[in-house]
Image: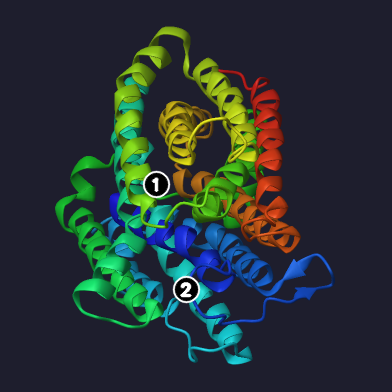
Amino acid sequence: MMGWSIMINLISVILIYLFAPPATSGFPYLITQASIFVVFNAISLITSGGRLFDAFYDPFIAQFSDTSKNPKGRRIPLMKLAILPSLVFCFLVFYPLKETESVSNIYWLIFTLIGFYVSTTTYIIPYNALLPEMTETSNEKVRLATFQSLGYVLGIGVASNAFNLTAFIQQQFEVASKLHALQVAVIVFGVLAAILMLITVLAIDEKKYSTSVPSSVPLKQALGQTLKNKNFLLFVVADFSYFLSVTLITSGLMYFVTVLLGLKEEIGNTLMITMVLVSFLFYPVTNWAANKIGKKKVVLISQFLLAGIFFGIYMLGKFPVSPAVQIYSLIALAAIPLASLNILPNAILADVIDKDSEETGQNKEGIYFAVRYFFVKLAQTLGLALFSMFLLYGKDPGNDFGVRLNGLLGCGLCLLAGFIFSRFKET
């Protein structure tokens, strides 16, 4: 989890900031910054297109995995094949053909982003399908999901150091180009991520620990059965709203720090350490609360708390305290609901899948996670597109209304997610 989290979040943290940089960033313009059809810009269309292509790829890799009769397992062999291309494309995304504004950079970015998303999806979908297969009780699912969340948050923490390592490389090795230093930082973190992903496929004996059998249900029928599960659809719709809002935070972090508060990019590292430490404190609380009052109630409380955090983002720079106090307080508070929202959705989905397996006699773990991640990626696509579009209304110090708009949007989305998920039936 930590490995692919590093790769995914390198893209999330850096991509828009690099290709739609504020004037004070020190990065050159690599693609056009002009608006397209008034409300779009190039980076919003590129990121949305890459994510959308990937979302439609999900069900096919899930069905391939679910029906696989590979003697070494349905999941691990696919994951092994995906590691090297994930690493290669992760690096190429940040290696434009030209270091000045160019149309060729746009085509290159489209190609490399699609390659990256397809490669990592080939790893992530089978990986997530292992959760319900390797656990038996609801408590085991929550416990494993907790450790998965721990890995994911650590991955975010590592990826957030990209600009710190960039500054270190520039200073210690006298690299004049900030772009070149960033590329070295990406390859360092990418190799670390690939090693962590490799440990999983080498260390887990799927045939020993997994109890499922290949599905015999055709793709169209499997998708139909999945989408008729009302409880699952309520989960997915709420999940969609949540991930759309979280994408706004991930994409906007460097803008919140540099544009709204006038702080340096390198502070992102200590912010993530703060978030990770506070999250860790609330992991045991999340497990206790889930067992005491139920997973659904904990998720609902967390969604409404996160709505308040987003309103705080809109107000950044306007509170009567120092910029550092504002951002550290907001990140520490955000870590509380994120602790449970990183843990419990996977455990809830595993429960839904188990119930379906009992009722239908078919193991469709991959399809369920594929449909879930299809909507997650649609949410991330829309989140990236909206964030990039809002930047047209101001992304520089003193002209920041576009950045602030994302706080209001995130607040509304979290409230919507909470109201929808309130109809979920926890059994």
Amino acid of disc 2: Gly
Residue 424 in percent (x, y) is at 63, 22
Q: Marks 1 and 2: in contact by CB < 8 Å? A: no
Q: Residue furthest top?
A: 292
- The residues tagged by marks 2 and 1 sit, at their Cα atoms, a distance apart of 38 Å
Q: Quadrant of residue 319?
A: top right
Please tell me which residue is depicted at 61% across the width and 42% down the height of the picture. Answer: 245
In front of the other: 172 or 298? 172
Task: Say which residue label 2 marks.
Answer: 26
Question: Which label number is shown at residue 79?
Answer: none
* Residue 264 appears left or right of 55: left
Task: Say which residue label 1 marks.
Answer: 128
Amino acid of disc 1: Asn
Above or below: residue 223 compared with residue 93: above
Label 1: state its secondary structure: helix
Q: Quadrant of residue 416?
A: top right
Please tell me which residue is depicted at 40% across the width and 61% down the height of the picture. Answer: 10
Are there few (<14), some (14-19), or many (20+) residues within 10 Å of tag 2? Answer: few
Are there few (<14), some (14-19), or many (20+) residues within 10 Å of tag 1? Answer: many
Label 2 or label 1, whichever lies nearer to me, is: 2
Above or below: residue 5 compared with residue 240: below
Residue 145 in percent (x, y) is at 35, 34
Dot 2 or dot 1: first in sequence order is 2
Q: Residue furthest right?
A: 37
In front of the other: 388 or 346? 388
Residue 217 appears in the figure: no
In front of the other: 18 or 358? 18
Please tell me which residue is depicted at 40% across the width and 55% down the height of the picture. Answer: 124
* Residue 371 appears left or right of 118: right
